[in-house]
Amino acid sequence: MKKFKFACFDVEQVGPDTPLRLEVAARLAFPDGSIKIAGLRREIARGRLEYEVIAGKQFTTLADIKRMRERCRVKAKDLAFTSAQHSTRTALSERMPFGSSETVTGKSPRELLQARLNLNRQARQKKP
């Protein structure tokens, strides 16, 4: 593990409740540099990161950052499709073919149109 040396203290002296300036806290909690001071300030503004103001300076702790990370954690969504639903759908699709391009009656479109026209003629003839 890489040791960080800051100007005035040794990192090994830092505990979870040691007040740290935002820059130092960001460098310790996110050593890859993915979160900087601005990111911590945004989380403070959103109310997810607790902090203290001492002598006009903002401080936070590694424990506060840990709690912030827990608040920001995204929960995994439940699967919308389960194997039980799959077996039900499979049973239905075996009974009724979905998306079949074949007509159910086996008649051509021309024959279906002719039958419809005949029904219309019969309906007109029955009217007084």
Image: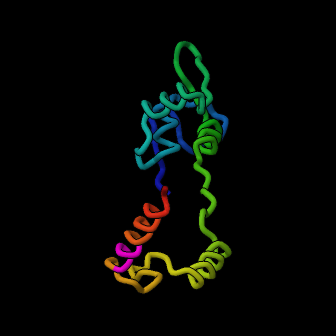
Residue 38 rendering spot, x and y as whole percentages: 42, 30
Give the residue drawn at x 42%, y 86%: 106
From the viewer's side, name the closer residue of 55 and 12. Answer: 55
From the viewer's side, name the closer residue of 3 and 78. Answer: 78
Quarter of the view holding residue 72: top right
Quarter of the view holding residue 61: top right
State the residue lying farthest toward the front. Answer: 128
Residue 29 rendering spot, x and y as whole percentages: 52, 44
Give the residue drawn at x 45%, y 68%: 122
From the viewer's side, name the closer residue of 59 and 81. Answer: 81
Which of the colour schemes (rainbow, by chain, secondary structure, one colour) is used? rainbow
Task: State whether residue 15 appears in this view.
Answer: no
Residue 71 rendering spot, x and y as whole percentages: 63, 41
Give the main secondary structure, helix, strand or loop, of the magenta stretch.
helix
From the viewer's side, name the closer residue of 28 and 115. Answer: 115
> Going by the image, does 123 lie left or right of 93?
left
Task: State whether residue 34 appears in this view.
Answer: yes
Query: In the rendered picture of this protein, how many numbered marks are placed on residues?
Result: 0
Residue 76 rendering spot, x and y as whole percentages: 60, 56
Give the residue drawn at x 61%, y 78%: 92
State the residue lying farthest toward the top. Answer: 55
Magenta stretch: includes residue 112: yes
Q: Note whether 33 is above or below 100 in the view shown.
A: above
Q: Note whether 26 is above or below 122 in the view shown.
A: above
Q: Note whether 66 is above or below 88 in the view shown.
A: above
Magenta stretch: includes residue 34: no
> Going by the image, does 43 lie left or right of 119?
right
- Please report the bounds of the magenta region as a residue range: 111-115
Give the residue drawn at x 61%, y 64%: 79
